[in-house]
Image (tube, rainbow, N blue to C red):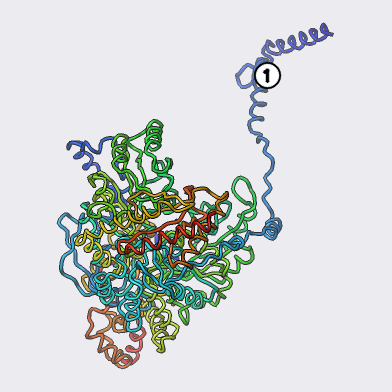
């Protein structure tokens, strides 16, 4: 068998070599045709033939019109919103008067701890007068975005006033509190930038971080060790420090927990690792510091070290809107690239004049800050021994945050428990308290609780009444 | 749609090219000078806050004509207002306010029904509510920021628009960007018009759903996109979509066009997609009783799933609303972050809207509402037709109070704006990035508080020949015209001639032929 194979191979080889070595049989056009030329020509023809053949691809069959029709008929969309359950039918209490320290709900007078009216400016005479003057002169709305005749001289005055009060070169006004932070962050952070943010920031900051498309790294809530580790990690990993912008985003007083950020630590870390700070001072502007200038004043940090400060004016200043302040470059850049500034109507002029009057009041009466601090301290003391609830906020924070000592098991039952405490406090003792509500879109995982917003215009009896009521209700509900 | 002639496109591109070249030259010299001077030590190790080409447009193109934008005013944005004059010491890089103001005709503010200034019915009630509820509630709607006024306005808005329930927000921009993530998420599809507003784009991006765009105002293309997308399913996995939402606007603010709502609703119904209508500019301004684009085009509000609108334009206040079925509104009250986390709308602003809607509906006991609606319709149609007769290229449909005039060339933008201001008419000019690069325009917004004298025109180069004929037909108006030489259409016509934006031939006025016939 093997011998036959060898014989066949040998004879084939002989045949091939004879074809190659065949003497010239013909002369075509002066070119002698040797045997091997024929073989080579055949080879070239075969190669060309193969090259020109199309490679095998399974034929594409687009869907016919009839098939598309069938698919469209078969498709059933989900309902636009999920089924409404019992707990979605929550109706908030309706106020029938101004949201001052005492308000009227359902015809009864209640002590109001649900409004962030820290300086007690709701119902202040001077502010109301300036608003009335502005309403008569300018009407209510400004009817246009800032670029198209929506800039009224009170806006410019307000911006200058805030900048002068804080000691920064310039500031820019926004027309709504939460839109401030989620317009500022995408204006400065683009794809490829790095942001290190606290995990307890509120929804508007999270939305801004998401819209900016930058890489976001979260560190443990108010934990400086964790922040340092994350900064270290990020600096090690990043390749081009000169081309990539890096930011730390923190809030001065966290809405979700009442903690205060240690700004001097953060500034030290920022200078060590070359980051920039974006600080949201919505609840600390007009509250912290000897003159109410915010967290920088409170921690003794010069204001130039903080790159971008934003704040909503719906809290201490008892008006609406927000502002952002920083160096001239920072503020000018926002005038053209911040979407909430360019594409939205400007702040109603009467609210801007209310802000001016509020800042004036704060400058003239710094004693209101010490009153606020005394109130917070009193309430803090009184609430330190509520059964079932524990204080989770900082001792200087005007948001007094109480969370459950022991969770009842699921988030839903916790919410129900806290809601029932708030409801009983309102109905039986006429004390209006707020529970934290989390939206389904919120990514914050901090525990929920009860929030009391302390105001400088609360009297001592109000605070004692609230504390007594909470102790009683909590004792009866959590047992 | 805009028809851009080739020569105009070429000249516009050439102008932009020239500006770009000069800008690059200046940047080069700036870098040279920056090398020579020592860099500041504190910025070492930091990336600049705006890298390289990102703000090239701002530095080299926008700053040259900065005085045409952001003009401050010193009075209410009514039909006539005071524009503050600004001066610059360093070639328009920084502008400083002066004490001088000039009284100008306002063709730029969104004041469709004239509620911008103090109104005899609204303002006393607003002041009353200010004294009662103060300027702000300092609290979110769910905590302690809901007042009786908010509840009243929500019911009133729902009744006005024709839906079951409504929910209020303090700012129109936030209404869109916080709402869309609430009703659709990953696995859903959003099909939005190519010229939708930035707030819708932001909301769509923030929701995490897939976004597809259909050609502006073309229901046939929308149908194509829908069929294709339903057949294909989600990208890569090809699972069927969870839900599809189509987002359109009532009046597009940069085009002045009305949306083709009946056809779009028919397409959406056929393919079971949900519709979202943004009536920011059309609510209160169009329709026989001011109920917006649905009334004007004869669409039943029950066919649109979610209707959104703002109070800034026609009602002279601030804020936005969503009107939909009871279940949707209840769900939004439970989970929309703008409702749970944002300060509630300021009570005087709420009262302004309540009073404005009552005036429009005639519930205040007078017929001012109906008069305002009739006036804005007449004014818009009159102004648009006269501008078209003069030869300007005006976009938009009849009945829409927004009319853009095409300028195209970048040099014409500041020329038009400054020349009109010199003649005491304030107009708004819009360029890139709010519009495509080559399609710069001047946008005029008509208000019900503009009087005919303000708008009336006589073509300045044909009027003197036809005083006898005009006198017969328009006697009293002519007398007023003679007095108000700075009335707007003369101004716009003159300025248009000066700059050369009359891209179409002016129609010869009919009086010319009549005059000739009379002579013969």
| Left or right relative to B138: residue A46 | right
Residue in front for this viewpoint, A251 or A247 = A251
Residue in front for this viewpoint, A47 or A434 = A434
Q: Chain of mark 1?
A: A
Does A389 appear above or below A346?
above
| Secondary structure category for the residue under label 1 | helix
Q: Callout 1: 10 Å neighbours few (<14), some, many (20+)?
A: some
Q: Is residue B195 visible?
A: no
Q: Which residue is mark 1?
A: A39
**Could you tell me which quadrant the C terminus of chain A lies in?**
bottom right
Does B186 appear above or below A460?
above
Give x and y (percent) for residue B282: 44, 73
Give x and y (percent) for residue B171: 40, 65
Give x and y (percent) for residue B462: 28, 81
Give x and y (percent) for residue B265: 58, 68
- Residue A79 location, quadrant: bottom right
Residue in front for this viewpoint, B173 or A48 = B173
**Could you tell me which quadrant the N terminus of chain A lies in?**
top right
Name, please, the residue furthest toward the right. A1
Q: Is residue A218 visible?
A: yes
- Residue A467 location, quadrant: bottom left
Looking at the rendered structure, the number of numbered marks drawn on it comes to 1
């Amino acid at each position: 068998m093997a011998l036959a194979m060898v014989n066949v191979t040998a004879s084939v080889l002989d045949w091939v070599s004879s074809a190659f070595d065949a003497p010239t049989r013909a002369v075509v056009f002066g070119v002698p045709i040797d045997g091997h030329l024929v073989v080579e020509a055949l080879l070239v023809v075969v190669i060309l033939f193969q090259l020109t053949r199309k490679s095998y691809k399974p034929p594409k069959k687009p869907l016919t019109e009839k098939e598309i029709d069938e698919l469209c008929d078969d498709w059933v969309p989900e309902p636009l919103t999920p089924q409404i359950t019992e707990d979605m039918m929550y109706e908030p209490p309706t106020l029938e008067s101004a949201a001052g320290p005492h308000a009227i709900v359902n015809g009864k007078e209640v002590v109001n701890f649900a409004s962030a009216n820290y300086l007690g400016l709701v119902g202040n005479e001077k502010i109301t007068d300036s608003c009335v003057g502005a309403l008569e002169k300018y009407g209510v709305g400004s009817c246009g975005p800032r670029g198209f005749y929506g800039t009224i001289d009170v806006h410019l005055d307000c911006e200058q006033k805030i900048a002068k009060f804080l000691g920064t070169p310039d500031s820019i006004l926004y027309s709504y509190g939460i839109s401030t932070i989620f317009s500022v962050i995408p204006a400065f952070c683009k794809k490829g930038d790095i942001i290190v943010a606290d995990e307890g920031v509120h929804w508007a900051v999270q939305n801004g971080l998401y819209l900016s498309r930058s890489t976001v790294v979260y560190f443990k809530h108010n934990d400086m060790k964790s922040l340092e580790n994350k900064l270290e990690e990020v600096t090690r990993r990043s390749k081009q420090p000169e081309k990539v912008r890096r930011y730390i985003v923190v809030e001065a007083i966290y809405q979700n927990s009442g903690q205060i950020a240690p700004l001097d630590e953060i500034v030290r870390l920022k200078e060590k690792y070359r980051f920039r700070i974006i600080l949201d001072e919505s609840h600390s502007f007009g509250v912290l510091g000897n003159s109410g200038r915010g967290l920088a004043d409170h921690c003794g940090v010069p204001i130039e070290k903080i790159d971008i400060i934003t704040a909503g004016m719906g809290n201490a200043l008892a008006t609406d809107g927000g502002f952002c302040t920083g160096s001239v470059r920072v503020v000018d850049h926002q005038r053209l690239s911040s979407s909430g500034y360019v594409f939205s109507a400007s702040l109603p002029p009467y609210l801007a004049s209310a802000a001016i009057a509020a800042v004036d009041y704060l400058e003239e009466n710094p004693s209101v800050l010490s009153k606020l601090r005394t109130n917070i301290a009193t309430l803090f003391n009184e609430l330190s021994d509520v059964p079932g609830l524990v204080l989770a906020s900082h001792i200087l924070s005007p948001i007094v945050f109480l969370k459950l000592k022991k969770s009842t098991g699921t988030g839903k039952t916790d919410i129900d428990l806290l809601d029932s405490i708030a409801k009983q406090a309102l109905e039986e003792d006429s004390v209006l308290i707020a529970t934290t509500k989390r939206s389904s879109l919120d990514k914050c995982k901090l525990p929920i609780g009860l929030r009391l917003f302390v105001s400088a215009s609360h009297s001592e009896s109000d605070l004692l009444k609230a504390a007594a009521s909470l102790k009683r209700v909590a004792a009866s509900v959590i047992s | 749609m805009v028809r851009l002639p080739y020569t105009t496109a070429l000249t516009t591109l050439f102008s932009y090219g020239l500006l770009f070249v000069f800008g690059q030259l200046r940047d080069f010299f700036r870098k040279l000078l920056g090398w020579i001077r020592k860099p500041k030590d504190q910025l070492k190790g930091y990336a600049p806050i705006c890298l390289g080409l990102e703000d090239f447009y701002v530095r080299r193109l926008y700053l040259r004509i900065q005085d045409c934008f952001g003009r401050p005013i010193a009075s209410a944005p009514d039909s006539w207002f005071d524009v503050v004059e600004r001066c610059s010491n360093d070639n328009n890089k920084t502008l400083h306010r002066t004490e001088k103001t000039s009284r100008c005709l306002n063709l730029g503010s969104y004041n469709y029904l004239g509620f911008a200034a103090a109104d005899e019915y609204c303002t006393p009630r607003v002041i009353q509510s200010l004294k009662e509820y103060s300027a702000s509630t300092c609290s979110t709607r769910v905590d302690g920021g809901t007042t009786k006024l908010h509840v009243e306005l929500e019911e009133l808005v729902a009744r006005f628009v024709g839906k079951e329930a409504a929910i209020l927000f303090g700012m129109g921009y936030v209404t869109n960007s916080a709402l869309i993530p609430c009703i659709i998420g990953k696995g859903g599809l959003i099909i939005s018009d190519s010229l939708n507003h930035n707030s819708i784009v932001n909301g769509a991006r923030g929701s995490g759903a897939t976004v597809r765009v259909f050609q502006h105002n073309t229901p046939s293309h929308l149908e194509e996109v829908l069929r294709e997308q339903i057949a294909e399913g989600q990208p890569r996995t090809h699972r069927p979509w969870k839900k599809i939402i189509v987002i359109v606007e009532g009046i597009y603010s940069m085009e002045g066009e009305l949306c083709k709502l009946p056809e779009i609703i028919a397409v959406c119904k056929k393919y079971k997609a949900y519709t979202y209508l943004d009536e920011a500019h059309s609510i209160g301004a169009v329709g026989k009783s001011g109920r917006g684009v649905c009334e004007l085009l004869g669409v039943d509000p029950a066919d649109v799933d979610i209707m959104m609108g703002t109070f800034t334009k026609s009602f002279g206040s601030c804020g936005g609303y969503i009107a939909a079925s009871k279940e949707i509104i209840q769900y939004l009250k439970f989970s929309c972050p703008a409702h749970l986390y944002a300060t509630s709308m300021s009570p005087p602003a709420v009262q302004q809207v309540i009073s404005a809607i009552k005036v429009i509906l005639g519930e205040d006991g007078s017929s001012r509402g109906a008069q305002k609606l009739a006036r804005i319709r007449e004014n818009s149609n009159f102004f648009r037709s006269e501008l078209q007769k003069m030869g300007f290229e005006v976009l938009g449909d009849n009945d829409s109070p927004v009319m853009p005039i095409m300028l195209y060339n970048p040099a014409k933008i500041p020329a038009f704006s400054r020349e009109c201001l010199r003649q005491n008419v304030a107009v708004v000019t819009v360029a890139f990035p709010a519009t495509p690069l080559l399609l710069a325009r001047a946008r005029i917004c008509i208000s019900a508080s503009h009087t005919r004298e303000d708008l009336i025109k006589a073509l300045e180069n044909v009027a003197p020949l036809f005083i006898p004929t005009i006198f017969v037909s328009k006697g009293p108006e002519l007398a007023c015209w003679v007095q108000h030489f700075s009335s707007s259409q003369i101004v716009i016509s003159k300025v248009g001639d000066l700059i050369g934006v009359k891209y179409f031939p002016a129609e010869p006025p009919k009086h010319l032929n009549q005059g000739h016939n009379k002579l013969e």
